[in-house]
Amino acid sequence: MKSSGYKTGLLLRLGIGLLSVVLLFQIAQRYPFRIDMTEEKRYSISEPTKKLLQRLDQDVVVEVYLAGELPGNFLRFQKAIRELLEEFAIYTPGTLDVKLVDPAQASSSRARNQYFQGLIQQGLQPTNLNYSQDGKNTQKLIFPGAVISMGGRELAVNLLKGNRASGPEAIINQSIEGLEYAFANALQQLANPTRKRVGLVLGHGEPDTTQLAGLTNLILSKYDLFRINLPERKTPITGYDLLLITKPTKPFSEREKYLLDQYVMAGGRVAFFLDALRVNMDSASGEGTVAIPYETNLNDLLFRYGVRINQNYVVDLNCGDFPVVAGNIGDQPQIRMLPWPYFPVITNYGKHPVVRNLDAVMTRFVSSIDTVKAVGVEKTPLLLSSNNTKVLGAPITVAFNDLQSELLPEKFQKGPQALGYLLEGTFTSMYKNRFPPAGFSRNEIVPESAPNKLVVIADGDLIRNELSLEDGKPLQMGLDPYSQKTYANEDLVMNLVDYLLDEDGLVQTRAKEVKIRPLDKVKVKQERLKWQLVNVALPVILLVLFGIVKMTIRKRRNTY
């Protein structure tokens, strides 16, 4: 009887345990939740991303081209992608299907090359990977990106992004930090077929269409772009979400400034890319040429908004190269690339998500920016020169002969200079308590804006693309035709445009931080044997001890 009661109680407890497990499983399925115990919340997604995912009304397919044999850091990258997309799937009303694809798995080299070309045409950027594994050196072409399909539309997303000045591990880490924004931004584009309208302000000697081809293609990849001839406009600027002012060389009239000012007061966003000084490089040989100020007539407008572009040049030891003729071989000139500090390469950024983990950006003849008092406006520096900087005040003589001089660090001790600012807040009209230009009524003036955002960059060449040395065709923005280096000018401009037009707060996801906690390699080597023994022997010892204890208890029970 006693044995029968014991068995009944055991079965009852077992049944209750099984029912509890099933019940908990059903609750977890119906009301899913996760607890992120990491310090930096690396496995959590932001509220703007959650809201975006919850609005998706169609199924999503994500093909990730990162499979097959990969080194450890890329396997970690692949795992981070899978974990993020699994988290996305929890908040998506429909299905989110993830497929890992190895592009190198093709039936023949010809088929593989055709497949590679198709991925490149879709917009994925290949990476040539060299790594050593088990004493064998391996070279492999990979496509660290994804193609997202939803509602009959497709969008390619490049996922490997970061500052190339960092090491490989840091680049992977920066790419992991940017995964949420990369996928959320792409899904937002697919979910919102209505494109925002960007206006390109013309009529003041801006670069021609070939020099703005890179900018045009970049904007058109995501937004609708319209050309606005401002001198011909008689009515207020409406119907545009953002205006781009790109390296004007002629003055804006008071009427044009009034139209811009009232556009800002009405909530319109503006990105200014301006040069303070003009330099003619064709006259820079011999004794050189003198840089003279551009008279754009925008200084007072920017001053009212909180910044002043100085009439100087910031020269930097961290710079690009410029080609010079160093002699002749026969009748052919010998070209040498020499450091040109008038072309600062920006790797120093402010603390803002829009420039976080950004690769190097090329600037040319850039000026410093000072901030001035503007009530209600927050000013955030975005671009800064390096520590090894010198500031040249007007008048400035620019000469190719300077390329022959040794660049001494002790002469570049001015420290970081702000070259670009983000302005956010409530802006005051330049025409508040003033008479407007002829043709406009004082009663029509909007004296103050609602919360708004502007960007001011003291380099008009940042958005200008170079032309091919071979056929004169426009190159990609940020591509140096001499060194063939591609800088992150496109990424910077698109980040700025996205942020100025972002109403959902997705750009804030770029602030995500994933800390690297590397192992102490010396300690690992010293204690490797100990931990191997612990991992292998300890479970066996514990199992044997458990068996001995169980047998002892059973013997005692049988004795009594």
Image (cartoon, rainbow, N blue to C red):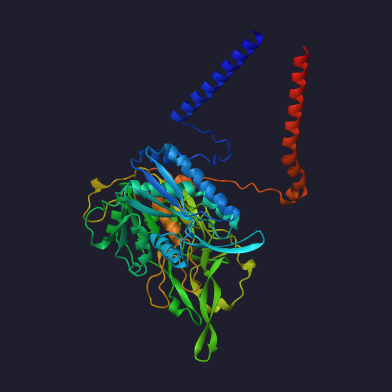
Asked whether 301 or 468 is in front, the reply is 468
Work out whether 300 lies above or below 19: below
Work out whether 523 lies above or below 549: below
Asked whether 147 or 462 is in front, the reply is 147
Asked whether 217 or 71 is in front, the reply is 71
Asked whether 474 or 440 is in front, the reply is 474
Work out whether 378 lies above or below 315: above
Who's the residue at 64% across and 7% down the image? 1
Residue 349 drawn at (x, y percent): 52, 55
Q: Give the quarter of the image for residue 291.
A: bottom left
Residue 449 drawn at (x, y percent): 34, 45
In the current view of this chain or complex, which residue is farthest to the top?
A: 1
Q: Give the quarter of the image for residue 54.
A: top left
Query: In the image, is 309 to the left or to the right of 547?
Result: left
Residue 333 drawn at (x, y percent): 51, 86
Who's the residue at 42% across and 38% down the image? 50
Q: For the C terminus, which image quadrant?
A: top right
